[in-house]
Amino acid sequence: MNEKPEATAEKNLMTENPGMTSKITAESALETTPEISIVLPCYNESEAVGSFFKRTLPVLDRLALAYEVVCVNDGSRDDTLSELIKIKETVPQLKIVDFSKNFGKDAAMSAGLDFSKGKCVIPMDCDLQDPPELIPEMVKIWKSQNVEVVLAKREDRSDDSLAKRLTAWLFYKSFNQFSDLEIPENVGDFRLMDRKVVDVVKSFPERTRFMKGLFALAGFKTAYVGYKRPVRAEGQSKWNYWKLWNYALDGITSFSTFPLKLSTYFGLLVTMLAFLRGSWILIRTLIFGIDVPGYASLMTAILFFGGVQLVSLGIIGEYLGRIYIETKQRPLYVVKQVL
Ligand code: UDP
Ligand code: MG
């Protein structure tokens, strides 16, 4: 009896996955496949897109390989879209995916991956913080060294503030500690991925698209190129500490259940201590008579454990909320038009 549901689950996995892959390959074989797809999420980047294309297109042209640029307009409120349309007049390789509203960078990147057809895909930021001059080197490594992923690794973060570096370090350390995965430090979304990797990432069904984690989960053979990340060329960063904190929570809860176990371990420890302390009070009372009860120690204990319980509930809530979101199976993004 016990084995039955497991067996069906395994069968489902086996029947579902090959179906998924064959659909993807059939889909991508329909059109002529470019060699390289650049995926570019844009949110309020009207100032930046112009200079992005001015610097990136010559690099791509020099490679003499067929390429496409998939721009995802993530519900920009400025005239990013009209800028892109203007650029498209002279750049036929540009494909514009226009969202109905802002869905966030990870959703925009997922859409970019979904709409890209290239044999390899390179997600980039619009603000020229990912230097396009690295692309030829990445492509060369991908073609010559038989690797499926080429990561661009930031060699120094001296331009970032101390607080930003510290929090980034703390995040990578705790993520790698808590989850079974290892996400490489100082690596952003800027990377080259072979079609195989992209198809695997696309097949992950989850709604919470913590891309760094999904990329790492896909695995494959990886090479690195080092670079120094310049400061943002134009416009403003869309991240603040509150967003980063929530992003970190998404990352950790998506890839680890360790925080759920924390209260178990803490509870066990406290139970043990309470047992020892309780036995001691009992023995002392039997031998020396009734002690005068302490208001301060009682109050401290009540407040402390009240806090611990709320935090534990909060942790459960974080997971429960995410289960709730996942079960709804809402679409990751809504496309208004594709140009
Ligand atoms: N971005 C997006 N949707 C958002 C926020 C950002 O598509 O909701 C895009 C943005 O246009 C840029 C890239 O994601 O191309 C990186 O954003 P940003 O430069 O603000 O992040 P940072 O470099 O500071 O991490
Ligand atoms: Mg940036």
Image (cartoon, grey):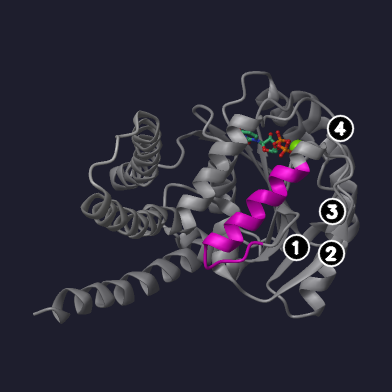
Please give the residue where the numbered disc 4 appears in the rendered image. 233
Of mark 3 and mark 1, the one earlier in the sequence is 3
Measured in 3D between alpha carbons, the distance from the residue under mark 1 to the one under mark 2, in whole angstroms, is 6 Å
Please give the residue where the numbered disc 1 appears in the rendered image. 151
Measured in 3D between alpha carbons, the distance from the residue under mark 3 to the one under mark 1, in whole angstroms, is 18 Å
Cβ of mark 2 under 8 A from ligand 1? no
| Residues at circles 1 and 2 in contact by the CB criterion of under 8 Å | yes
Of mark 3 and mark 2, the one earlier in the sequence is 3
- Magenta segment range? 165-183
Ligand 2's quadrant is: top right
Q: Residue 152 location, x and y as percent?
A: 79, 59
Q: Nearer the viewer, mark 3 or mark 1?
A: 1
Measured in 3D between alpha carbons, the distance from the residue under mark 4 to the one under mark 1, in whole angstroms, is 22 Å
Q: Residue 319 location, x and y as percent?
A: 37, 47
Of mark 4 and mark 2, the one earlier in the sequence is 2
Mark sitting on residue 60: 3
Would residue 1 be visible to someone looking at this image? yes
Q: Residue 251 location, x and y as percent?
A: 53, 50
> Please, what is the three-letter code of the amino acid marked with disc 4?
Ala
Give the residue drawn at x 46%, y 38%.
333
Residues 163 and 76: in front is 163
Please give the residue where the numbered disc 2 appears in the rendered image. 225
Q: Residue 52 location, x and y as percent?
A: 82, 38
Residues 132 and 339: in front is 132
Of mark 1 and mark 2, the one earlier in the sequence is 1
Against 308, residue 198 (above or below) is: below
Q: Which secondary structure lies at badge 1?
A: strand
Instruction: Quadrant for residue 172, please give it.
Output: bottom right
Most frequent secondary structure within the magenta stretch: helix
Measured in 3D between alpha carbons, the distance from the residue under mark 3 to the one under mark 4, in whole angstroms, is 20 Å
